[in-house]
Image (cartoon, rainbow, N blue to C red):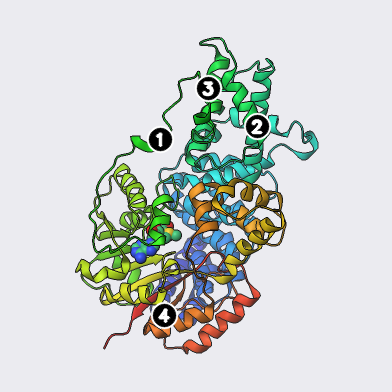
């Protein structure tokens, strides 16, 4: 290398190091000047480009940040680990700038870099894929999903959602008619081990695939009955049977189908023939209660009851009498979930620092109040392995589900207690962190429940609360009216019909939001969505008064990422709360989908 070039590179590195230290000391203008100088001396200085990009983000110049990250990504030289970081930085900047396609492309390129499967970038890629709605089949994306499938700890429910929405779009419009669409989809699933595995083990939350699967099953029965069934579909049918168990037999069956099932049961098929095996698998994909019990089956059927699950007694504290809500969640443990929650190990101190608090109080106890089937509690236990986690719930059935999952993942720092959060003080424990998401709005008195959990926080402790937003609940009210117009009483016994009505009216008002929700694809999820006997919904104004009445510091809503949203707040921010809530209210009016499920926010009691 030329002496001159060498000198320039050295000079560039020197300036870059000085810039780093100015950046660290918060002298941002000086840091920017030095980075520019560094890049002028060596336009290939990856670190200088990356760090100036980070600085530009801090200064609010997102476009410049994206431009610089992109330049850094395209340079040869960095190690695979650094390349992955650069790709992550670029994709995040592109997302922030609203360039979703560009971000997808960046993530896809990252899948080819060594170490991708072991880095958190994979999880962020899936998060993005999950949050958008792809309207066409993308071969590149589909191929990258196979890479994601092999990653330990990937959220298979989320992956299944994206994977099957791509399968639904795969048969190109030009090459299929309505008639051959189910056959094409069947071919795709049968020839794809990932699709078969996801169909067996994860909830498939795509209504087009659901409709197609139902058609395929009906066609199979019809062809067996007319002796035209000439190819076995054992792998597909085994997976379908598992899917139906997982969603608790939620697919709609009309009278015609019921009668065909009845005929299938009575049909004399040659013992030990492949067709007989397929017929048995088909029958097992129907609910024992609804179909099988009403008929005398010549087939030995699998045990469909959940008795194989381990039953344990959970310590019960302070439960007075059964409430309507307890009854409801005993019958409908919520949510139905299948794959180990995504997590990256951390400490409570780190969390407190992000929220602008010096450090976590010493106890390191975490309470998940109203933990349901334990998904969040397990995620928290995995995230904070040094903390002791308690999951509390009034529903024994939910706690049993949670315990089975905890034991499956061999988690040791998580205990479950059967009890009412209103009486949390009788537990005689104090917590550094309490999470209570999706629970208080099901209480007779949410404020009282809020007071109860906050009083169990040790000094300096914080709580994360999740409450239904009124806006998010309106599509359910619209669906209720639609059902009544169609003569369908809005009751649990009509659940399958109501679901079908929603699918058929996908474009009616905001019905698509219901049909696109994960809860729509399992019975317990639907029960919670449609038939919860006690629920209240909140507005931004209600939350403001909730926070004031509880005499708490408010550290902002979790969902702060969007460009024009009011800045994400942290604890110790002394800005005016009235104007903050007013800004959020205005913002929500313009972006009504923003809190599409819940308001999630952080509180810290003000104690004298
Ligand atoms: C919608 S689920 C939310 C579950 C979980 N937090 C989640 O977000 O996945 C509501 C849960 O709150 C529980 N619950 C309702 N009232 C409760 C109370 N007073 N004390 C404890 N748990 C309660 C229910 O049994 C149910 O499991």
Question: Which residue shows up at 35% across the image and 49% down it?
Answer: 397
Mark seen at residue 305: 1
Residue occupied by mark 2: 257
Residues at circles 3 and 1 in contact by the CB criterion of under 8 Å: no
Q: Is residue 585 placed above or below 368 in the rendered structure?
A: below
* x and y, in percent, of residue 71 in the image: 58, 60
- Residue pointed to by mark 4: 554
Q: CA distance from mark 4 to mark 1?
A: 46 Å
Instruction: Quote the CA–CA distance across marks 3 and 2.
Output: 16 Å
Quadrant of the rendered image containing residue 319: bottom left
Separation of residues labelled 3 and 1 (CA atoms): 17 Å
Callout 1 secondary element: loop
Q: Nearer the viewer, residue 44 or 454?
A: 454
Q: Element under label 4? A: strand
Q: Residue at x 46, y 24 (%)?
A: 301
Q: Earlier in the sequence, mark 4 or mark 1?
A: 1
Label 2, secondary structure: give it.
helix
Whether residue 161 is situated above or below residue 127 in the rendered picture: above
Question: Total of numbered circles in the picture?
Answer: 4
């Amino acid at each position: 290398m030329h002496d001159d070039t060498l000198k320039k590179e050295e000079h560039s590195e020197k300036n870059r190091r000085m810039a780093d230290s100015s950046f660290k000391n918060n002298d941002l203008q000086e840091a920017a000047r030095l980075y520019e100088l560094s890049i002028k001396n060596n336009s290939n200085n990856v670190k200088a480009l990356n760090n100036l990009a980070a600085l530009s983000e801090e200064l609010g110049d997102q476009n410049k940040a994206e431009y610089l990250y992109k330049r850094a990504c395209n340079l040869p030289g960095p190690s695979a680990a650094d390349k992955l970081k650069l790709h992550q930085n670029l994709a995040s900047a592109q997302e922030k700038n609203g360039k979703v396609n560009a971000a997808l492309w960046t993530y896809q390129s990252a899948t080819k870099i060594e170490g991708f499967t072991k880095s958190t970038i994979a999880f962020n890629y899936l998060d993005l894929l999950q949050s958008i709605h792809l309207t066409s089949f993308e071969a590149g994306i589909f191929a990258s999903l196979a890479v994601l499938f092999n990653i330990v700890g990937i959220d298979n429910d989320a992956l299944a959602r994206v994977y099957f929405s791509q399968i639904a779009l795969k048969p190109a419009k030009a090459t299929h008619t309505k008639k051959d669409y189910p056959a094409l989809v069947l071919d795709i699933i049968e020839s794809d081990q990932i699709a078969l595995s996801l169909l067996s083990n994860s909830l498939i939350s795509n209504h087009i695939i659901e409709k197609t699967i139902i058609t395929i099953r009906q066609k199979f029965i019809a062809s067996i009955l007319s002796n035209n069934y000439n190819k076995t579909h054992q792998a597909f049918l085994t997976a379908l049977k598992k899917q139906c168990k997982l969603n608790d037999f939620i697919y709609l069956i009309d009278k015609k189908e019921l009668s065909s099932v009845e005929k299938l049961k009575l049909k004399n098929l040659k013992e030990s023939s492949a067709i007989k095996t397929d017929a048995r698998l088909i029958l097992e994909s129907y609910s024992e209660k609804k179909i099988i019990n009403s008929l005398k089956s010549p087939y030995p059927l699998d045990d469909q009851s959940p008795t194989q699950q381990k039953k344990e007694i959970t310590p019960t504290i302070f439960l007075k009498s059964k409430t309507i809500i307890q009854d409801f969640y005993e019958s409908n443990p919520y949510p139905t979930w299948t794959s180990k929650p995504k997590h990256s190990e951390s400490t409570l101190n780190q969390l407190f620092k992000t929220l602008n608090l010096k450090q976590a109080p010493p106890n390191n106890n975490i309470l998940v109040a109203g933990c349901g089937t334990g998904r969040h509690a397990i995620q928290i236990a995995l995230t904070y392995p040094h903390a002791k986690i308690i999951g509390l719930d009034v529903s024994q059935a939910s706690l049993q589900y949670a315990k089975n999952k905890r034991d499956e993942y061999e988690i040791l720092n998580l205990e479950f207690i059967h009890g009412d959060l209103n009486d949390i003080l009788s537990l005689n424990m104090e917590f550094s962190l309490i999470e209570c998401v999706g629970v208080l709005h099901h209480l007779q008195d949410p404020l009282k429940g809020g007071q109860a959990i906050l009083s169990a926080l040790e000094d300096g402790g914080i709580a994360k609360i999740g409450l239904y937003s009124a806006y998010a609940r309106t599509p359910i009210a619209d669906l209720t009216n639609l059902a009544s117009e169609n003569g369908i009483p809005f009751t649990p016994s009509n659940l399958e019909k109501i679901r079908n009505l929603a699918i058929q009216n996908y474009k009616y008002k905001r019905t698509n939001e219901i049909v696109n929700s994960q809860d729509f694809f399992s019975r317990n999820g639907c029960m919670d969505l449609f038939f919860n006997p006690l629920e209240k919904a909140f507005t931004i104004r209600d939350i403001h008064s909730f926070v004031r009445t509880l005499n708490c510091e408010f550290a902002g809503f979790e969902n702060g990422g969007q460009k024009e949203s009011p800045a994400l707040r942290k604890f110790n921010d002394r800005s005016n709360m009235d104007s903050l809530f007013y800004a959020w209210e205005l913002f929500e009016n313009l972006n009504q989908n923003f809190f599409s499920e819940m308001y999630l926010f952080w509180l810290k009691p003000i104690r004298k």
